[in-house]
Image (tube, rainbow, N blue to C red):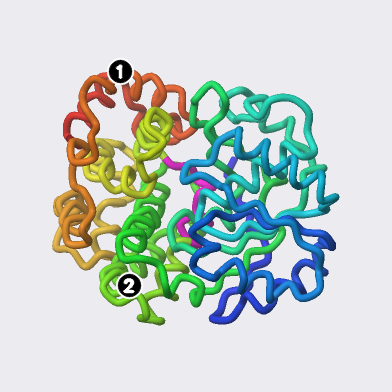
Amino acid sequence: MALITYLTQIQFEFGAIRQLSAECARVGIHRPMIVTDAGVRAAGILQTTLDALGDLEVSVFDATPSNPTEAAVRAAVDLYRSGRCDGLIAVGGGSAIDCAKGVAIAATHEGPLKTYATIEGGSPKITENVAPLIAVPTTAGTGSEVARGAILIVDDHRKLGFHSWHIMPKAAICDPELTLGLPPRLTAATGMDAIAHCMETFMSAAFNPPADGIALDGLERAWGHIERATKDGSDREARLNLMSASMQGAMAFQKGLGCVHSLSHSLGGADPRLHHGTLNALFLPAVIRFNAGAESVQKEQRLQRMARAMNLDSAGDLGDAVRDMSKRLGLPTGLAEIGVTPALFEKVIDGAMADHCHKTNPRLATRDDYREMLEASM
């Protein structure tokens, strides 16, 4: 059976942040806590958010790490409770939004966070009692503002997925204006994240034609505008299309992802300093080659359809095109460039085999397959 669900209320326009107070009233949030990070505060976006909230009494947690941890969630929960808050506003990239989703669970559910992880059988334990959440993305990459999942590093250092429709944000405020000051390298890394999301979910074998259409359109938008947005951060058309592509990739997540994310989740857990979007871009060429042998990919001509969306001559050009795009954007094109060595391979493979994305790849990977992907990505 195909389960097709769409999704949440989205405000999408330049200046959409001005709708935040009205969205809080609609959702029933009267004493919000903002979950964000130091970079968002320094960029002035936190103040823009506070201004949009008017007279509401607001608590602020601005210590979200680049890869959110259970320790950060606990610290935020303490502030949430001491401020007698009744809802959350995540302002930032995927890290802040995922951290806020962790807070939404932990503030209203007992026990350690891993209790609610997908691979621990925890999804059914997440109830409608979660704290309500509004998401305001400030990057164009993860799409977490319209996704039912979060990725968090728990206390035993595993990077785990948490999935429930209950942690879907009640509203998403997608304002491309908030991304105009994003630095070029972060624009590139998060943009490649959006590209990876659109491509990997499109390759998934699950039957969901609406998600396929959304992902393919998102890929075309991201591929056509990522260089412009990176080279000229004030290009409003490029910023709008990149933010839309990010949102669209996550709208299609319900099909499932695959080996790219199995590997990047695992390696990101082993070394939290590594950027998720950069890792996705690094693994994508090897996974595309591996997926070319999948029956569903061949039958549906999925590689050829992605090539057309990217204005490439043939499906055989996909992997090289992704690698060349990363190079043009100033991103690394091999794991060795970011300090990864073969000594980590077995640990990364262990994590990839257990990851929630492993079984939704269109072709089931073995340990040897993952090893070959890692070697090809060096």
The amino acid marked with disc number 1 is Glu
Q: Position of residue 302 (x, y in %)?
A: 31, 51
Tell me the amino acid under the disc marked 2: Ala
Vertical order, 60 against 46 (above or below): above
Which residues are drawn in magenta?
Answer: 247-257
Q: Which secondary structure class fits the magenta region best?
A: helix
In the image, what residue occupies the spot 69% across and 75% down?
52
Residue 248 shown in magenta = yes
Q: Residue at x 36, y 59 (%)?
A: 186
**Residue 256 on image: x %, y %:** 48, 42
Q: Residue at x 29, y 59 (%)?
A: 305
Mark 2: secondary structure: helix
Q: Name the side, left or right, on which 36 lies relative to 354.
A: right
Q: Earlier in the sequence, mark 1 or mark 2?
A: 2
Q: How many marks?
A: 2
Q: Quadrant of the C terminus?
A: top left
Expressed as whole percent of the image width and height from the top left, the position of residue 327 reads 17, 56
Q: Is residue 148 visible?
A: yes
Q: Nearer the viewer, residue 201 or 19?
A: 19
Q: CA distance from mark 1 to mark 2?
A: 37 Å
Q: Is residue 226 left or right of residue 83?
A: left
Q: Is residue 196 above or below residue 8?
A: above
Placement of the N terminus among the 4 image quadrants: top right
Any part of residue 213 in sight = no
Q: Is residue 250 above or below residue 217?
A: above
Q: For residue 229, which numbered disc appears in the image? A: 2
Residue at 49% in and 26% down = 158
Q: Which residue is mark 1?
A: 346
- With 287 as the anchor, is 112 left or right in this view? right
Whether residue 12 is in magenta: the answer is: no
Residue 130 screen position, x and y as percent: 77, 44
Disc 2 crowd, CA 10 A, few/some/many (<14, 14-19, 20+): many
